[in-house]
Image (cartoon, coloured by chain):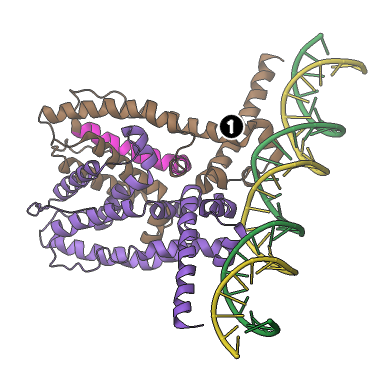
Chain colours: A purple, B brown, C yellow, D green
DNA sequence: AATATTATTGACCGATCGGTCAGAACAATC
DNA sequence: GATTGTTCTGACCGATCGGTCAATAATATT
């Protein structure tokens, strides 16, 4: 096997795997792990069912792989904040980043939500390990901001959960939002309006002076 | 059938139906409509599978019945607000009521969430009908509050969604919250702290002067 | 006591589940 | 062109799916 053909083969394999992962993400996110069937995933990917198993091994392996892919997308968020950071800037970015991630990977977000609803059987370890550390360390920094008088003395954990829930809501409850607003998908104007609202309420609610308004390219 | 025996029979029937509904709510809320099996529900209820179908007719009928029961619990929320109401009092109550409802009916809340995640196949009509009207009418009142200068000029729809998401989060993501906090269930002190936080941030964030602090019995 | 009604459930139905496997089809190496 | 290795997939497996049904048991009505 030459380097050329190896690359070609791998590229072909990658393309097929991406097709399967994308199809599986849709089905799993809608119906959860148990509710999803390999046949439904195969239909979505327009491949024979046996082909799915040939590439992914098993239903569980496919599911875990999707979870890991989604988790890895979150690694960069709020990675480099310090006690000296500007709370307004950081929280603004946090809100916008989470909002963009949700809009960019709606199926991944819903997949995560379904996993949590089922009691997080495959993510228990991650939640009580990595994610707990993530929250603890960020909470410590936010507490320092409060002590420095940069913001009100609120419980940082509840603040993080608030931003999580508020942003996640618009992807996971998209069916509800659409039904209520009467729009099939949120327009860019809606998204901008929502970001603006969340920043206004959360920053003001935490007693943070807003950083000078900059024109954000949030999508 | 005498009146006495009729009551007795109906009481017996009611008790069995409640057992089934409760068991089904647990299973459906964890695994969604497709992921739930009648056998799992029967095991949970400690009844033969055929008995479930004898009382409920079909899987779909059982599911729809659960959805309706959950929806009916929400009917009273924010029912009697007017342009003259005090925003601080109303939003405070809204936050606490939603928080209590989520804690009181965690399985029902999760059931609803799973239905929305699946694309709301059984609730599309409700969302774009009753619920849309509910939101529209409340939004109109909130807008009047803004015009009267009682609060900032924020989009009332985003405000309603914010309160929904923030409160719902603690029931639907209970597995995540537990994992991160390292507590199996939220303590009463945690709940009080969360309510306090949400009121502080949301009211202040909307420019609403807080109503004099009253000792609330929120659970 | 006899009869009618309702409640209960094991056995079974066709369909679908996740997963296996043998062999066809295809491509790379010699 | 023969050989080797990889990709692909129809056919099949036992288990489970939602649902039916006939029988039995229990209860009401007469």
| Residue B95 among those drawn in magenta | yes
Q: Height in image: A64 above or below B104?
A: below
Is A134 left or right of D3, judged from the image as shown? left
Q: Height in image: B204 above or below B78?
A: below
Q: In terms of image quadrants, where is residue B129?
A: top left
**Which SS type dominates the magenta stretch?**
helix
Q: Residue at x 40, y 51 (%)?
A: B173
- Quarter of the picture holding the C terminus of chain B: top left
Q: Residue at x 33, y 32 (%)?
A: A182
Q: In terms of image quadrants, where is residue B116?
A: top left
Q: Residues within 10 Å of mark 1 (few under 14, many from 20)?
A: few
Q: Residue D13 appears at what percent x and percent y?
A: 76, 59
| Residue A216 among those drawn in magenta | no
Residue position for label 1: B61
Q: Height in image: A12 above or below B138?
A: below
- What is the chain letter for disc 1? B
Is A13 left or right of A84, judged from the image as shown? right
Label 1: element kind = helix
Q: Residue B192 appears at what percent x and percent y?
A: 30, 46
**Residue range of the region highlighted in magenta in the rendering:** B88-115
Q: Does the rendering let one see residue B18?
A: no
């Amino acid at each position: 096997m030459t380097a050329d053909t190896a690359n070609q083969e791998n590229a072909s394999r990658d393309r097929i795997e991406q097709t399967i992962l994308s199809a599986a993400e849709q089905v799993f996110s809608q119906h959860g792990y148990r509710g999803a069937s390999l046949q439904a995933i195969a239909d979505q990917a327009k491949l024979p069912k046996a082909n799915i198993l040939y590439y992914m091994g098993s239903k569980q392996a496919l599911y875990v792989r999707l979870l890991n892919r989604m988790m890895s997308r979150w690694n960069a968020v709020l990675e480099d904040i310090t006690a000296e950071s500007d709370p307004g800037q950081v929280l603004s970015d946090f809100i916008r980043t989470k909002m963009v991630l949700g809009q960019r990977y709606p199926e991944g977000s819903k997949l995560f939500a379904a996993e949590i609803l089922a009691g997080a059987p495959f993510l228990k370890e991650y939640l009580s390990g990595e994610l707990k550390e993530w929250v603890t360390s960020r909470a410590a920094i936010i507490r320092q901001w409060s002590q420095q008088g940069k913001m009100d003395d609120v419980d940082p954990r509840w603040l993080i959960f608030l931003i999580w829930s508020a942003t996640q809501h618009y992807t996971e409850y998209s069916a509800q939002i659409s039904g209520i607003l009467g729009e099939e998908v949120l327009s860019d104007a809606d998204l901008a309006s929502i970001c603006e609202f969340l920043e206004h309420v959360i920053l003001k609610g935490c007693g943070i002076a807003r950083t000078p308004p900059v024109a954000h390219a949030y999508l």
